[in-house]
Image (cartoon, rainbow, N blue to C red):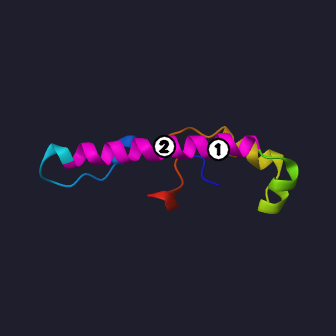
Amino acid sequence: MRTSVPSIAHIPARTGSGRVRWTNLVARLGLMWQVYKERDQLKSMDDRTLADLGINRDQVAREASRSPFDLPTNRF
């Protein structure tokens, strides 16, 4: 699991109008919110559901404590 916190400054921005850059920023913030909510939902799952997913309470605690800026790389 990745533990470093990537900077929001590395958001890829196309050259051209500032509108495209704002669109990328808004999309990234939306993704951050979605991942935050998913981590929050993960905390409320019961042990049986977590076992079905193949994870335990310690892994849930680590995932839930991650920063909203720490996004999984497979989500970009």
Task: Give the crowd class for mark 1: few <14, some 14-19, many >=20 residues within 10 Å.
Answer: some
Q: Quadrant of the N terminus?
A: bottom right
Picture quadrant of residue 39: top right
Q: Residue at x 74, y 41 (%)?
A: 43
In the image, farthest residue toward the left:
16
Picture quadrant of residue 53: bottom right
Residue type, mark 1 in image: Arg
Q: Main secondary structure of the magenta part?
A: helix
Q: Residue at x 30, y 53 (%)?
A: 12
Which region is colored magenta?
20-44
Q: Is residue 69 magenta?
A: no
Q: Which residue occupies the foreground of this view, 59 or 17? A: 17
Rendered location of residue 75, percent (x, y): 49, 58
> How many numbered circles does the render carry?
2
Relative to residue 24, is residue 59 drawn left or right?
right
Relative to residue 20, is residue 45 drawn left or right?
right
Q: Say which residue label 1 marks.
A: 39
Q: Quadrant of the C terminus?
A: bottom left
Rendered location of residue 33, percent (x, y): 50, 40
Whether residue 48 is visible to the viewer of this picture, yes or no, is: yes
Which numbered tag is attached to residue 32? 2
Q: Which residue occupies the foreground of this view, 26 or 14? A: 26
Q: Is residue 42 magenta?
A: yes
